[in-house]
Image: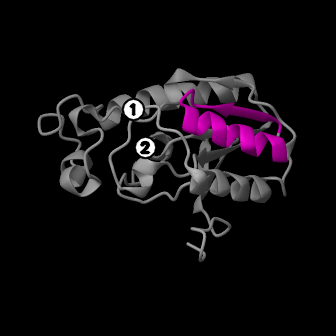
Amino acid sequence: MTEICLVRHGQTDWNRDERIQGRENIPLNETGRRQAKESAAFLAQEEWDVLIASPLSRAVETAEIIGRAVGLTVHATDDRLVEREFGLASGKPVASIYEAVQANDAERVPGLEKEEEIQARVFAAIEEIVAKHAGKRLLIVCHSHTIKAALSSIDDSFSYRTPLKNACANYIRHDGEYTIERINVAEHITDGTKKV
């Protein structure tokens, strides 16, 4: 059996300000670094074999913080794990474009990567990583829609509307087929004043 934990990166200023964030290389902010450390402490309670990340800096920095806690360096980055391309929606307030993105409507959001497109690239990456590291416990640090693409590829009842908190953990196992075990595990992540 291969076990996979998909971890969302910590908070950035664009997350904090509720702006659509796609492939822009927005770094972690101080809250995001703290969340990554909290995620690292949580994940360090388990044994992990391989650490992989999206190449975007917010994912790489989150992965490096986690790696120091779990005793791993980033084995590889994979371009297929980058965040969804949001086209002309990038940088805009989430509230102003949310419904059009959720409708998967590339006409209303020029340049939007369609759900089927992100699912194809992300799941191809997951399958290749699982084949290469069969029987291992894998940490993959990436992005909200990247994780949602993986989950919806496994279970088509999974909705892109399901919120995923920054630095949350999402567990999948592969034993001939893929099974989602837990999603949005984030009880260990704080916003600085209270549990979220």
Q: Say which of 196 and 108 sits in front.
A: 196
Q: Which residue is mark 1?
A: 118
Residue drawn 37% across the image and 54% down it? 159
Q: Is residue 14 magenta?
A: no
> Which quadrant is the C terminus positioned in?
bottom right
Q: Are marks 1 and 2 in contact (CB under 8 Å)?
A: yes
Q: Classify mark 2: helix, strand or loop.
A: helix
Residue 25 visible in the current orientation: yes
Q: Is residue 66 magenta?
A: yes
Can you say whether 51 is above or below 166 in the image?
above
Residue furthest to the bottom: 194
Residue 34 is labelled as none
Q: Classify mark 1: helix, strand or loop.
A: helix
Q: Residue type at mark 2? A: His
Residue drawn 50% across the image and 25% down it? 80
* Total tally of numbered discs in the picture: 2
Residue drawn 33% across the image and 33% down it? 116
Q: Say which of 31 and 178 sits in front.
A: 31
Q: What percent of the width, then of the height, locates residue 193? A: 59, 75
**Magenta segment boundaries in residue numbering:** 49-69
**Sequence order check: which comes first, mark 1 or mark 2?**
1
Q: Say which of 9 and 112 sits in front.
A: 9
> Which quadrant is the N terminus positioned in?
top right
Q: Which residue is mark 2?
A: 145
Q: Residue type at mark 1? A: Ile
Task: Please rate how many residues cluster around mark 2, counting C-alpha atoms within 10 Å: few if below 14, some from 14 to 19, many from 20.
Answer: many
Quadrant of the rendered image containing residue 49? top right
Q: What percent of the width, then of the height, locates residue 98? A: 24, 53
